[in-house]
Amino acid sequence: MAKLKIQISFIIALSFLSQFSIAQQLDKRIYEKTFYKSLDLIYEENYDSALVILYSLDSISAPQFLKNSEEYQFYLDSQFINLEQVYVKYLIAVCHLEKSGNPQTALPYIEYVIESGYSNTPTIIYKDLGRLYHLDYQFDKAIYYFNKYLENVNQKDEFYLYVKHMNNACLNAKEIIKDTVYKEIQDLRGNINNPKLDEDQLVINNDGSILYFERDSGKNQISKIMVSYRNFDIWTKSKPLIFPSSFLLNAKSIRICGMDYNQANLLVYKETELDTKAFKCRVSADKVIEIQPTNLDFLGNNDGRICYGKNEKEVYFSSARSSGIGGYDIYRVSQKINGRWNKPEILELINSTFDEVDPFYNRINSTLYFSSSSYTSMGGFDIFTAIINKKNKIGNPQNIGFAINSVGNNRSFYIPISTNTAYYSSNQPSNIRLHDLFRVKLNKSIPLTLLNGTFLAGDPAIPVKMKLTVVDIETKSKLKYSFTSNNQKGKYYIVFEPGKIYDLIFESENYRAQRITVEIPQQEYFYQIFQTISLIPIDKVNNDAVNELIVKNDFYDLGTIAQDSLKQYKNDLVNLFSNVVEKIDSFENFADENLTASTETPEQAPENNFEDLLDLIESTINNQDTATINQLFENSEKSEVYSITYNSHISEHNHFIIIGNDTIKTSPPLRAYHNIASERISKLIGSNDMIAHSYEQGSLLNAKIAFQYEMVFKLDNYKMLPKYFPVLNDIVELLDKNPYLQIVIEGISENKTADKAKELHYTKQKAQIVYEYLYNQNCRCKDILIHTSLQPSELSENYTENHYFVLIKIFDLSN
Amino acid sequence: MILKKIKYSISIILALLLFNSQRVSAQKYTESQLKAGYIINFTKFVKWPDSLANQNFVFGIYGDDIFGDVFQKMLEARYKSPNNWILTEYNSIKEIEYCHVLFINSNNQDEINEILKLLSGKPVLTIGNNIPYFCQRGGIINFISEPNGKKFEINYISAKNKGFIIDSRLLAVAKLISASGY
């Protein structure tokens, strides 16, 4: 009856609201009544109904009716808003936070409330906001709000420890997500995952063909266990596993315990009024056809999942028994000769005061997998690994990495013995409170990196014949292969062992030999690095011995694009390249365009897949799945890891490198390291090129120019040359670290055409291109000024063609 | 020796073919395809004022066309015969007439300001392609490229002022900007 009353109220409220256009102001009395109705519904925990009303209120102009409303007018981005508007948004946020579903929906509304400066914002909202940013992978913001919460409460606060834990989790997460270790992850949607229900606690048989899991349908069921069979890589529709009625007679609950030693039969816990015992079940189709008691008599009421260890006489299990360190812990127990079990041993190295659950031992790599919500997780349960050595000693736990682990709960990691695929449960992207089952491909480690690219020299750059020698810096030994590039195409190929630093010595007739130090990162996948090297002759610029070398590397991780078809070839590929490393001495006549060309053209989606893409996009919005949106956009672009440009007086001093019996004179080495930017920044600001002269406009009058950099644009081209990117990136970092610096971007034109207005327009556009690049790199743009001028430039003397110039001047305002 | 070279050359070619074959089979979308896909879907999550609901749907592009024929093909994929969609390109500000959606892909800030002023108060869903401060100036949606951040921003105040109702699910995946703009 009460429900009916509420529904009728809604219908009345909604029909009333619908009579008003959104631009019209609703009658104050009705607005107020509707507003308080929503409050009542929130108190009744009827959040869905409250949201219906609140959304309607949010779409119309709010009249003022709350006490002291006049005092609560806020200035927010050029407009006044009143307390009622803020309050409605706050209540929407409360509803999203409290109702089951995706609490991240509350984020924009809480942001609005915080930005509005609403002085009565309760402290607890900082905790909620921190959690929402954490769920949204915005860890810096999360840390900011967690700290803000901690500043406002004392240590006795009920959430103090939780917020501290989450703060730490954000710091962990920032590190963990830097490296996406596992990428081929598949949501078992369709026949396994139901978007409205919770699927968890999976186990799978040895060849990965039978999957058991628990589905919580919200009903009071004795058994929640489901079963599904894999048929040609497709899981059949899952069905409830049917137990004999005699077995269910006195049972309070039946839940998954694990699999037997051979991963052939399911083990279940049967909980009765008296005790909890483990049973082995033989299953046919969706029916349990045989049930046997097990010898696992050490298990009881407080115990979780089990797995067998290196043999049938060793078992790992999780338990909340009182002898533990805290919460659930993982124990190991071994069987005596007489068949009895020893006292379970708690594994101290991997347990914490938080929960450790769901052990799974993989006999192939002697590794224990388990889930833990400890201080080293990303916030919820993360999956960890620990290697167990021959003496049965357990190693330090390692976080299995992103993207198996996420900011939610990741549990029940399970690998069928004879496959290279693992299964686990994790939060649904659209609903953090429900779990789904996922499958991940465990890629074999292919410890090789292929460097290929083009060697060019001269201006304009053309392919030249080049000799390349490779030295392992650690062993100081020349690798037994050296390469000569093809002088028609300039292509070269090198295969590296990762995790090492190498010197590459490039030699070419009429050019100074150049040494480049390259750090090949440690990685598990097969990598290709595409590197284009362009060497300008030594005496090109005013005989000033300026040696310009551009090294541009793109990392392309094959792991992200590996398809099933690759699987069968992977081993062949590894062997093939091993042969290349060992036996081939020269690629002189070897040329390939496909490999390099394919890096420059983004792969096109087949046109008939547009329907899928549109559906996928619609579902990302429907489910408010920002993670997938990010992934879609980020996958559409290649990531550039190395990119360095040098334009400095590096050849003033010759360097000599001695390799075996050879002595090679080179320019000083360039280091293609990830964190090279800071080195170059110090060069920028601390170089002898520092100029001090006055600038004639505004606040910059007589300001000192700390650094000046010139960029050239062709008349008919609006694209900035890639060689400028690293310098601009350095400038962004420079400004970030030095708040007293200000940039002026100066567009300069030669004024060679009669149409001055047009000329000025083009000049400004070129400067704006530079501005936009800086803006997109999160440069503090309020300190950027754009100027344009039409004047003959001394810069043009070095160029035969007509060009536009953009001068970047960095002013030092510290004085 | 020659045989050895041939053997290894074949090996390399085989390796490259393998690279190539899996590259071709990889499923990747270009940024413009994604943006076209999102724009088409935006229209499902935005309610236009009633007076415009039953008209042909006009989609305008100002500036460089990043879509080519992708947009038309996506419409065909979604609507089979999208006869009520009219795609139009504007080469100058003077040409801009009423359209339901205007995609702006320009670096010229003066032009952008002029367009936003021109459309101020009119129920045109303006979408910027990575234009600095687009929403702050009154644009409604802007594709942005923040690493690990939201991929588009929405000025819901501006949208509200122009009579649009934006579904909260779309707002939830966007970076929200609140500014009245021009």
Image (tube, rainbow, N blue to C red):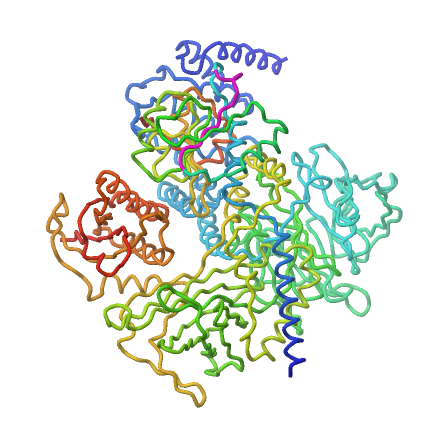
Residue A397, placed above or below residue A226: below
The residue sitting at 43% across, 13% down in the picture is A31
User: Which is nearer the eye, A290 or A482?
Assistant: A482
Q: Residue furthest front?
A: A754
Picture coordinates of residue A204, whole percent (x, y):
75, 52
Residue A120 seen in the current view: no
Image x and y of residue A111, in percent: 40, 34
Q: Which residue lies furthest to the bottom in this view?
A: A661
Instruction: Please name the residue shown 81% across and 58% down the image.
Output: A295
Residue B55 in view: yes
Is residue A85 left or right of A699 when viewed as pictured? right
Residue A23 lies, with reference to residue B2, above or below; the image says above
Span of residues in magenta: B52-63
A329 or A660: nearer the viewer: A660
Which quadrant of the view contains residue B98?
Answer: top left
Asked if residue A157 lies in the magenta stretch, the reply is no
Please state the horizontal and vertical placement of residue A418, each as a whole percent of the image: 75, 61
Instruction: Name the residue at 32% across, 30% down.
Output: A119
Q: Is A78 situated left or right of A34 in this image?
A: left
Q: In this view, does A601 lie to the left or right of A386?
A: left
- Please, is residue A288 above or below residue A369 in the view? above
In front of the other: A275 or A460? A460
B117 sits left or right of A700 in the view = right
Instruction: Give the residue displayed 47% in from the left and 22% down from the top.
Output: B165
In the figure, A117 relative to A779: above or below? above
